[in-house]
Image: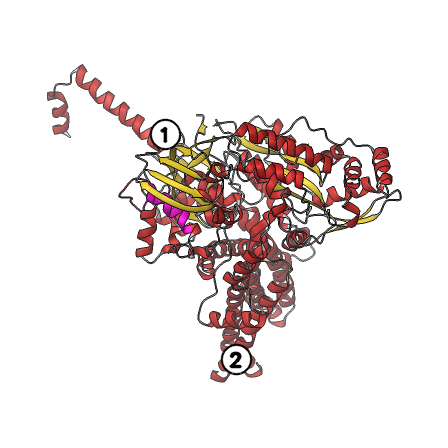
C-alpha cells in the first residue's frame, strides 16, 4: 500500500509541472499585450510602455519569467492580478465558495432526478417512459446552456415571477459574506427571509448547470441497470421469489451504481471548471467567469493561478478516488 | 388575571390618556415604517470595478463604482452637462498669465465615517495635496501601492504641467503650472483628481495595510461605501452630512450583471431600477413597455475612419475628400447602429461646446468622387487596406460590418480595400506605429473639453500615439495650440470652430458617427439625468412610491 501511495504521489509531481508549463505557455502565446489593453485607444508612449512592462514583470525573457513564477508558486505565492492588484489566491478564495455551492446544488439536483429516471427507464426498457427519458436526456445533453438559461429566466422569473432572475441574494438583504456560502451566511444572519431568498436564487442556476450531468447520470444508470439485470444473480434472486422492488433496489441497483458513482465523480470536476456559462447568465460570482474575463484582459497571473488551483483540485480528487479504489479493490493496487 | 382586570377597572382611563397612547402608537408606527421602507435603489451594473481608487484605473465601470458615488473633486461637472461648477473648491482665481490657480476650499466638509474608519478632522488642504502628490511624486509612500500606475494623470500631461502644489493655509491651495493650460479646470473635475482622506491614508500606512486604502474607499461624496462582494454586489448608504445636501435615496446597491439580456430580464422583473448598455435589438421592445422609461442622449464620442496620410495614396487631400464622398454614411448608421447613432460631420460630438454646426459634410456622390480621384491621378483607383476593430465599442458596435459596407462603397469608385483585423491589444499597438493604411477607430471624451478631442486625436504632438492619421498640419495645429493657451472661452470657441473647418477641408478622417446612449429604467425612477460622459450618477435621483 505504501508503495502504491508513493507511486501515485510521484505521478502528481510531473502532472503539476505540466499544468504550470502548459498554462504559462498558452497564456503567453495568445496575441495581445496587457499593457496596450490597459492603455486603450489613448495609446501609450514607448518609454511608459517599457516602464509598465517592468512593473508587471513582463520585461524578462519567457523562460526566466516561468522560473520566477514556478519558484513563487512553490513558496505559495501565485502573484497579483494585473487589473485589481490583489493576490490571486485571495481572489480565488473569495469566489470559490460561490462556485462550490452552485456545483453541489446542481449535482444534488442531477442525482435526485437522474438516478430514479435512469433506474425506471432501465427496468421498464422499451416502454413509453423509457423512450421519453432517453429523448429528454438527449435533449438536455445537447441543449445550448445560454439559450436554456435565458429561456428559464424569461418563463419562470419574468413571466411567472416565481424565481429571481440572477444573483445570489435579493438586494434588500445586507448580509456579510463570512463563509462565502450564501446559504450558510444567510442562515447565520438575523435578517428574516434571507435564507429563503438565497435558496430561491439557487433554483434556476442549479437546474441549468445540473441539466447535462442529469442527462449523463440518467443514461449511465439506465445502461448499467440493463447490464446488471441480465446477470445470473439477479435471475437467482428473482427465482428465490424475492419481491421485484427488493431485486431491483438491493441486488441490481447496488451493483449498477459502481460505474455511476465514477461518472458522478468525474462530473463534479466538470462542474467546478465548467460553470462559466451558467455563472455568466446568472451573474453568479464564481471562478469560471473570473478566469474567462481574465483571459480577455490578458491578466496572466489570474489565468495561470486560477487554472493551476482548479487543476490541482481535480488531481487531488482523482488521487483520493484512486486511493479509495486501491483500498476497496486490492487488484487495482497491484496492477496500478 | 384578576389583578390585571382590577387594575384596568381601578385605573382612571381618561379620553386624554387614550389620545396620548394613540398618538405615541401612530408616531412609532410611522417611524417604524420609514425605517422598514428605506429607499433602496438597485443599479444592475455591467461589470466589476477594478478597485476603488479612481486614479489607478481607466474604466468607466470602475469610475461608476468609485469616483462618481464616493468621492468629490475640486471642480465638478454640473449633473447631465459638461459645464464646470465648484466642487470641494468653493471658488478659484487664475493668474493673468494663466499659470497660477488658487483654490479656496469648502469648509466643514466631512469625510465618511465607516465601519473601518472614523475621521477625527474635516476635509482640508492636506487632503488635496495628498491626492495629487501620490500621483506625481515617485517618492511618496503611496506612489507604488496597488501597482502605482496613474494612467490618466500621466496621459493628461499632468506630470509635466504641475510644477508645484502649495498649501497657503488650511483652506487655500495653489497650483503652479509650467505653462498656461485652458482645460486645467476640466481636468480637475475628472475621476483621477478625486480627493482622498490623508488621515485615512496615514492610518492604513501605520497599520501596514496601505493596499486596503484602495479597496475600501473613504471620500466626501454623496454615498458612503459599505461593502463589496467581488463580482456580485457593491453597497452604499446615503452620506447623512453631505455638504451639498443628503441624497434622496437611502441605500444604493450595485448588482453586477454582465449579460445585457439578463439585465433586461431583471429590469422587467423589477429586480433593478436602472440598467446600462441595453442590447440594441431590445430597444424597440423597451420603448413599448409601459413600466420602462427609455431615456436617450447623444454620447460624448466619435467613430471615425482615419487615413494614414504618410501612405503614398493618401497624401493628397483630394483622394481623402473623394473617399469621404464615396461613403454612404446614412446607410451605415441604419445598418450598424440600428437607430442608436447619428451621422458625424465634425471630429467633436455636438454636445461639446465649440461644435461647429456650420461645417458642411461631404455629400454622398459617387460621380464627384470618381472625378476627384481622377484629378489626383487615380482614375483607375488603387488597392489599399482597411482595418476593422475586433471589439464592440459605443462609437462602433460592429466594425467588421461597417468595414464591409465601406469596402463595397469604395469599390464603386475603383478603390479595392482589403479588410484587416487583429486582436485588440495588437490592433492598438500596430495602428499607433502606423502600420495601417486606413483604419476604423473612435474616441470617448474624458473631460468635455474640445482639446480632449482635437489635440489628442489630431494634434502634431500625438503623431505616433493617439493620432492614428499621423496627420500633422501646421495651420490646424497652430489653431488648437493657441486655443489651449487662451483662457477666454469665447476666443477659444472661435479658434476651435476654425480648426474644424480646416479639418474638414483636409479630410484626414471620414467622420462616421456619434452613438446615442440609452438608459432604460423603471418608471418609478425620478430625476435621473444622462451623463454626457456615460457615467451613472445617482445623487439627485429619487424613487416614486
Q: Let me know if residue B385 is in the magenta part.
A: no
Chain of the residue on which disc 1 is drawn: B
Residue B492 shown left or right of residue B248 in the figure: right
Crowd tier of the residue under label 1, counting other residues whose Cα lies within 10 Å: few below 14, some 14–19, many 20 or above = few
Asked if residue B102 is positioned above or below residue B422 in the image, the reply reads above
Distance in Å between CA atoms under marks 2 and 1: 67 Å
How many circles with numbers are drawn on the protein?
Answer: 2
Residue extent of the magenta highlight: B114-134
Q: What element does badge 2 sit on?
A: helix
* Badge 2 and badge 1 in a common chain: no
- x, y (%) of residue B392? 65, 45
- x, y (%) of residue A198? 44, 46
- x, y (%) of residue B132? 41, 47
Which residue in the protein does label 1 denote? B245
Quadrant location, the N terminus of chain B? top left
- x, y (%) of residue B528? 49, 29
Residue at 79% from the left image edge and 43% from the top image edge:
B407
Q: Look at the image and name its color scheme.
A: secondary structure
Which is in the foreground here, disc 2 or disc 1?
Answer: 1
Crowd tier of the residue under label 2, counting other residues whose Cα lies within 10 Å: few below 14, some 14–19, many 20 or above = few
Q: Can you name the residue that lies furthest to the left here?
A: B10
**Tag 2 near tag 1, CB within 8 Å:** no
Q: Is residue A59 visible?
A: yes
Which residue in the protein does label 2 denote? A10
**Quadrant location of residue B196?**
top left
Q: Can you name the residue that lies furthest to the right here?
A: B380
Residue B450 shown left or right of residue B427 in the figure: left
Amino acid at each position: 500500500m505504501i508503495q502504491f501511495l508513493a507511486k501515485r504521489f510521484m505521478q502528481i509531481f510531473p502532472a503539476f509541472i505540466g499544468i504550470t508549463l502548459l498554462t504559462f505557455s498558452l497564456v503567453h502565446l495568445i496575441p495581445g499585450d496587457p499593457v496596450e489593453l490597459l492603455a486603450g485607444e489613448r495609446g501609450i508612449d514607448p518609454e511608459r510602455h517599457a516602464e509598465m512592462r517592468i512593473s508587471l514583470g513582463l520585461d524578462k525573457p519567457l523562460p526566466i519569467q516561468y522560473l520566477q513564477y514556478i519558484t513563487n508558486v512553490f513558496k505559495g505565492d501565485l502573484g497579483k492580478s494585473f487589473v485589481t492588484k490583489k493576490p490571486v489566491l485571495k481572489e480565488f478564495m473569495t469566489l470559490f465558495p460561490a462556485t462550490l455551492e452552485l456545483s453541489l446544488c446542481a449535482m444534488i439536483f442531477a442525482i435526485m432526478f437522474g438516478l430514479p429516471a435512469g433506474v425506471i427507464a432501465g427496468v421498464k426498457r422499451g416502454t413509453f417512459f423509457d423512450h421519453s427519458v432517453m429523448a429528454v436526456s438527449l435533449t438536455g445533453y445537447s441543449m445550448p446552456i445560454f439559450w436554456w438559461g435565458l429561456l428559464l429566466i424569461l418563463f419562470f422569473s419574468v413571466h411567472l415571477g416565481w424565481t429571481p432572475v440572477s444573483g445570489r441574494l435579493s438586494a434588500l438583504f445586507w448580509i456579510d459574506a463570512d463563509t462565502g456560502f450564501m446559504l450558510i451566511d444567510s442562515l447565520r444572519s438575523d435578517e428574516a427571509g434571507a435564507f429563503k431568498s438565497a435558496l430561491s436564487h439557487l433554483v434556476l442556476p442549479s437546474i441549468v448547470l445540473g441539466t447535462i450531468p442529469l442527462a449523463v447520470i440518467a443514461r449511465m444508470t439506465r445502461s448499467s441497470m440493463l447490464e446488471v439485470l441480465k446477470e445470473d444473480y439477479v435471475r437467482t434472486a428473482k427465482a428465490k421469489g424475492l419481491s421485484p422492488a427488493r431485486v431491483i433496489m438491493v441486488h441490481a441497483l447496488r451493483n449498477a451504481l459502481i460505474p455511476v458513482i465514477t461518472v458522478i465523480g468525474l462530473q463534479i470536476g466538470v462542474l467546478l471548471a465548467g460553470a462559466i456559462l451558467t455563472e455568466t447568465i446568472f451573474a453568479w460570482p464564481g471562478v469560471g467567469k473570473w478566469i474567462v474575463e481574465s483571459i480577455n484582459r490578458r491578466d496572466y497571473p489570474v489565468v495561470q493561478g486560477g487554472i493551476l488551483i482548479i487543476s490541482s483540485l481535480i488531481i487531488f480528487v482523482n488521487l483520493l478516488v484512486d486511493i479509495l479504489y486501491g483500498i476497496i479493490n486490492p487488484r487495482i493496487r497491484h496492477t496500478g | 388575571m384578576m389583578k390585571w382586570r382590577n387594575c384596568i377597572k381601578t385605573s382612571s382611563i381618561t379620553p386624554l390618556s387614550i389620545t396620548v397612547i394613540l398618538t405615541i402608537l401612530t408616531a412609532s408606527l410611522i417611524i417604524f415604517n420609514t425605517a422598514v421602507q428605506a429607499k433602496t435603489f438597485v443599479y444592475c451594473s455591467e461589470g466589476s470595478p477594478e478597485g476603488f481608487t479612481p486614479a489607478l484605473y481607466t474604466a468607466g465601470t470602475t469610475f461608476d463604482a468609485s469616483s462618481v458615488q464616493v468621492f468629490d473633486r475640486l471642480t465638478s461637472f454640473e449633473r447631465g452637462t459638461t459645464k464646470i461648477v465648484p466642487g470641494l473648491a468653493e471658488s478659484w482665481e487664475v493668474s493673468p498669465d494663466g499659470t497660477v490657480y488658487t483654490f479656496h476650499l469648502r469648509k466643514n466638509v466631512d469625510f465618511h465615517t465607516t465601519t473601518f474608519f472614523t475621521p477625527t478632522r474635516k476635509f482640508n488642504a492636506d487632503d488635496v495635496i495628498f491626492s495629487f502628490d501620490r500621483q506625481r511624486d515617485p517618492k511618496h509612500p503611496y506612489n507604488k501601492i496597488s501597482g502605482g500606475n496613474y494612467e490618466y494623470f500621466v496621459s493628461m500631461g499632468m506630470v509635466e504641467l504641475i510644477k508645484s502644489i502649495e498649501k497657503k493655509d488650511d483652506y487655500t491651495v495653489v497650483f503652479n503650472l509650467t505653462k498656461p493650460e485652458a482645460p486645467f479646470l476640466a481636468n480637475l473635475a475628472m475621476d483621477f483628481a478625486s480627493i482622498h482622506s490623508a488621515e485615512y491614508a496615514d492610518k492604513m500606512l501605520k497599520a501596514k495595510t496601505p493596499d486596503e486604502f484602495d479597496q475600501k474607499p473613504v471620500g466626501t461624496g454623496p454615498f458612503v461605501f459599505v461593502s463589496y462582494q467581488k463580482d456580485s454586489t457593491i453597497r452604499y448608504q446615503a452620506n447623512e452630512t453631505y455638504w451639498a445636501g443628503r441624497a434622496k435615496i437611502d441605500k444604493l446597491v450595485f448588482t453586477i450583471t454582465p449579460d445585457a439580456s439578463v439585465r433586461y430580464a431583471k429590469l422587467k422583473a423589477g429586480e433593478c431600477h436602472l440598467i446600462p448598455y441595453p442590447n440594441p435589438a431590445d430597444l424597440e421592445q423597451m420603448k413599448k413597455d409601459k413600466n420602462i422609461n427609455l431615456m436617450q442622449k447623444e454620447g460624448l464620442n466619435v467613430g471615425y475612419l482615419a487615413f494614414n496620410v504618410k501612405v503614398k495614396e493618401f497624401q493628397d487631400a483630394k483622394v481623402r475628400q473623394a473617399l469621404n464622398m464615396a461613403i454612404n454614411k446614412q446607410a451605415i448608421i441604419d445598418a450598424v447602429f440600428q437607430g442608436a447613432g447619428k451621422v458625424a460631420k465634425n471630429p467633436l460630438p455636438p454636445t461639446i461646446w465649440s461644435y461647429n454646426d456650420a461645417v458642411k459634410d461631404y455629400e454622398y456622390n459617387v460621380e464627384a468622387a470618381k472625378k476627384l480621384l481622377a484629378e489626383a491621378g487615380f482614375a483607375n483607383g488603387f488597392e489599399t487596406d482597411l482595418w476593422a476593430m475586433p471589439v464592440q465599442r459605443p462609437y462602433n458596435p460592429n466594425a467588421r460590418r461597417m468595414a464591409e459596407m465601406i469596402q463595397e462603397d469604395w469599390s464603386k469608385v475603383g478603390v479595392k480595400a482589403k479588410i484587416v483585423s487583429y486582436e485588440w491589444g495588437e490592433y492598438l499597438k500596430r495602428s499607433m506605429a502606423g502600420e495601417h493604411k486606413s483604419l476604423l477607430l473612435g474616441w470617448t471624451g474624458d473631460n468635455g473639453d474640445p482639446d480632449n478631442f482635437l489635440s489628442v486625436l489630431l494634434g502634431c504632438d500625438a503623431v505616433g500615439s493617439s493620432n492614428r492619421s499621423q496627420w500633422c498640419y501646421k495651420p490646424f495645429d497652430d489653431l488648437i495650440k493657441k486655443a489651449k493657451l487662451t483662457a477666454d472661452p469665447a476666443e477659444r470657441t472661435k479658434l476651435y470652430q476654425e480648426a474644424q473647418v480646416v479639418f474638414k477641408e483636409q479630410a484626414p478622417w471620414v467622420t462616421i458617427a456619434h452613438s446615442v446612449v440609452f438608459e432604460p429604467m423603471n418608471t418609478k425612477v425620478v430625476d435621473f439625468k444622462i451623463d454626457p460622459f456615460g457615467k451613472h450618477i445617482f445623487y439627485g435621483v429619487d424613487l416614486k412610491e
